Amino acid sequence: MVTTERRADGVWSSHLRTLTVGLVMSVTLVASEQLAVATVLPRVARDLHGHTLYGWVFSAFILGSLVGTVVAGQQVDRAGPAPAFTVGASLFAVGLVIGGLAQHMPVLVAGRAVQGFGAGAVPAVAYAVIGRAYPDALRPRMFAILSTAWVVPGLAGPALAGLVSEHFGWRAVFLGLLPLVAIAVALTVTALRGVGAPTVARPAPSSRTRLAIVLAVGTAVFLTGSTSHRPAVAFPLAALGLAIAFRPLRRLLPPGTLQGRPGLPAAIAMRGLNNFAFFGADAFVPLALTRVRHQSTLFGGAALTAATLTWTAGAWIQARFINRIGARRLVREGLGLIVVGVTLALVTLSSAVPAALGIVAWAIAGLGMGLAYAPISLVVLREAPEGEEGTSSASMQLADNLGVALGTGLGGAAIAYGEIAHWAPGAGIAIAFGLALAVAVVGAVASSGLPGPEAVEQLEHLSP
């Protein structure tokens, strides 16, 4: 069994190499799938006559991930990471098959929900394994490597998916990922078996699965309401969804999370705020550049590519400095950069400034996300009770998914309402950016609940 007692001699050392490669391959697989589907979805919606369900292709994936993350985290703490990863990867593959063979849009949405359930297992397993198998001093570097796993998909994935779709059809994009799933499983499962179950296991109650399902239902009702074009329907449904989701959310997260209690609760709350702030604007940056500033799709995509690259750069910067200056400062500075990036994105909506400012803006926001994202993960792993790394990681991923869902859902609702009310172009997007900006400011203030450098002074001599 791999233990944290092994000396910190590198993530590519003989006893960690296979595990590192397997985890990187798994993250690359999920990243490739998400970017590929986003690229080909306009053609899919056209062929399946399903534009009315366009947003649900993404929402179904998020809702499936909500449940899959909780179930996988629970199983990791009970039986170790290998079974949870195997089941998750298998369901991910099943979802790809359903999507690739779908003849109607509702079937594709169902396939994406299955995919999301399987994909939710990957980060829950990865974070728990990093907490158990890698020494504390190597974890920042490992998170930086996992961030780098998004670079190749971010640069080549959309173009490759477009070429495959153009020459072989969009179904080949879904089905063509199946060999990658087989490779990821082959590389990862054997190494995961070496990690095994925790020596001190505190299995989460089975009611967590039921709570996760209720939470997903409540989130679905909220998203249905938030995207409705009729205010008489939108507001009651959104309120009902929040009412349904609140109780299971409070029980699934560690006590004190919603209040930002210092330590583990504050770290998990920060991940939700962080993701809301970034992705609540990220989803609409290309729309702002193409629809409001009348730039090409390629130009809009360049902003996302720039953010992918700077996110990775930020991840490597935090890996170098976190054991010296602590998570609190990195997260606060990262959110500060997100504030700057979103503010500049707002300014870019004006025709008085160059459209290229949008690319610069989102590169700055991406750097901020790179600085803030991994340090929060490290705090969660350091603060997680022994034997509950999987459950704590699942709680963090739950906050991740909810942050994305709420940020994109509320932003999308503002844009939809602007269309109905015939607002000026960009007004709805400006509201979406304003929401993200407000949450980023709240997050920067709330980061005081994270540990400072005094919590890691004893690790300075092990800095990677």
Image: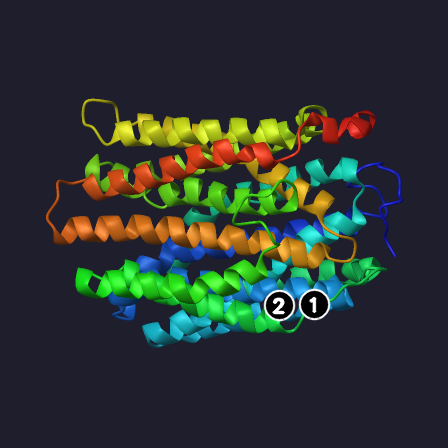
Which residue bears the numbered disc 1? 75
* In the displayed structure image, the side of residue 427 where residue 44 appears, left or right: right
Is the residue under label 1 in contact with that under label 2 (CB below 8 Å)? yes
Residue at 49% from the left image edge and 73% from the top image edge: 97
For this orientation, the residue located farthest to the left is: 422
The kind of residue on which mark 1 rests is Gln
Identify the secondary structure beneath mark 2.
Answer: helix
How many other residues sit within 10 Å of disc 1, few (<14), some (14-19) or many (≥20)?
many
- Give how far across and how far down residue 303 sits, in percent: 38, 35
- Its colouring scheme is rainbow
The total number of labels drawn is 2
- Residue 374 is situated, as x and y percent measured from the top left of the image, at 61, 39
Q: Quadrant of residue 359?
A: top left
Residue 303 visible in the current orientation: yes
| Alpha-carbon span between mark 2 and mark 1 | 6 Å
User: Which label is found at residue 110?
Assistant: none
Q: Which residue is mark 2?
A: 71
Residue at 65% from the left image edge and 71% from the top image edge: 87
Q: Position of residue 457 (x, y in %)?
A: 77, 26
Pinpoint residue 224: horizontal percent, then vertical percent: 31, 65
| 136 in relation to 193, above or below | above
Visible residue check, residue 116: no
The disc labelled 2 sits on which kind of residue? Val
Q: Secondary structure at mark 1?
A: helix
Q: Nearer the viewer, residue 347 or 158?
A: 347
In this rendering, the answer to whether 107 lies above or below 322 is: below
Name the residue located 33 percent from the left edge and 76 percent from the top edge: 104
Disc 2 residue crowd, few under 14, some 14–19, many 20+, Cα 10 Å:
many
Q: Between 397 and 107, which is closer to the camera in this rendering?
A: 397
Q: Residue at x 70, y 67 (%)?
A: 75
Q: Quadrant of residue 320?
A: top right
